[in-house]
Amino acid sequence: MEQDPDSIALSSAELLSREELANVFSYLDSRDVCSVACVQRGWREAADGEELWRHLLKDRFLVEDKRIPYSEREDGMPPRRGDAAPTYKACYRAWHAFYGSFEAESFKRVHKAWNFLGDHMARHLPEVHESLRPGAMERRCDDVAEQLGQPSMHPSIKLMYMMHDGQDLPFDKRIDCNDGAHLGPTAAERRSIFHGVFGGYSFYDHLINVRMLPLARALAWTMRVRDEFGLGVRAAERGLLLIAAVRRVAEEDGGGAG
């Protein structure tokens, strides 16, 4: 009696241990791993293994622990640095939900850059590191592009903001709320002059700070520049979005200009 070739292949696969199956599955992407998990119970158990999902997480998102993205949450709860998922599979699910729509190599380039900057700042510039805001949700980036009359935000810029939505700096907060902007900076505000993620330096009697603007401020300042310089449709067509700004402070009076 002739045997079905599929049943022979399945019987052969059943001879493999769970660890051996997981090793085979590690050559698949997450979508295919979920598909093979539907074949039979033994395959599902192998496809649920922690080591397999740790490998998939590192391979796709360059993440080696169970920390979830430091980003805005759908439930509105404030995110916390270092929040972790209970399993690697759950962690993969969290990263995929936030960044899965982006092409893998594009994501890796931006993520590597932020990881390099973040590690350096955490060790040598902790105050700058603490000023980085949680990542923005993708729909907020899309809303900004829509308000600017653009079909979409450039993927690299969107990814950059989805990892960190700019900086919270004391010097900028006072300008935003227009509270005492004519007064000299406080001690905390003066310290933050050099906390721009893109660098700061002194030039004669001026202090220079280049920082990353949060999306809301980037939108407001982009609209202001468009209006003041009459850029209008041209700016929208060219995808203009101000994402960084220089703060210049005169030593003698402590005033500033954005």
Image: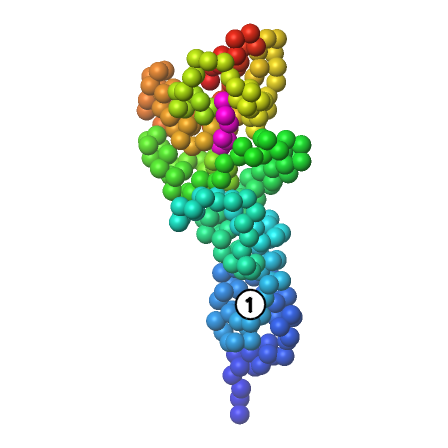
- Residue 35 in percent (x, y) is at 48, 67
Q: Which residue is painted at 46% across and 48% down in the image?
A: 98
Report the magenta residues as a range.
166-171
Q: Which residue is painted at 54% across and 55% down in the image?
A: 85
In the rendered image, the vertical position of residue 58 relative to residue 256, given as above or below: below
- Residue 162 in percent (x, y) is at 47, 40
Say if residue 156 shows up in the picture. no
Residue 219, quarter of the rendered image? top left
Camera-nearest residue between 133 and 136: 133
Q: Which residue is painted at 63% across and 31% down in the image?
A: 125
Camera-nearest residue between 130 and 218: 130
In the rendered image, the vertical position of residue 9 relative to residue 185, given as above or below: below
Q: Magenta segment: does it hold 215?
A: no
Secondary element at image label 1: helix
Exactly how many numbered labels are in the figure? 1
Main secondary-structure element of the magenta-colored stretch: loop
Identify residue type, mark 1: Ala
Camera-nearest residue between 22 and 83: 83
Q: Magenta segment: does it hold 169?
A: yes
Say if residue 20 shows up in the picture. yes
- Residue 177 in percent (x, y) is at 39, 24
- Count residues near mark 1 (Cα–Cα under 10 Å), then give few for <14, some for 14-19, many for 20+: many
Q: Which coloring applies here?
A: rainbow
Please give the residue where the numbered disc 1 appears in the rendered image. Answer: 47
Q: Residue furthest bottom?
A: 1
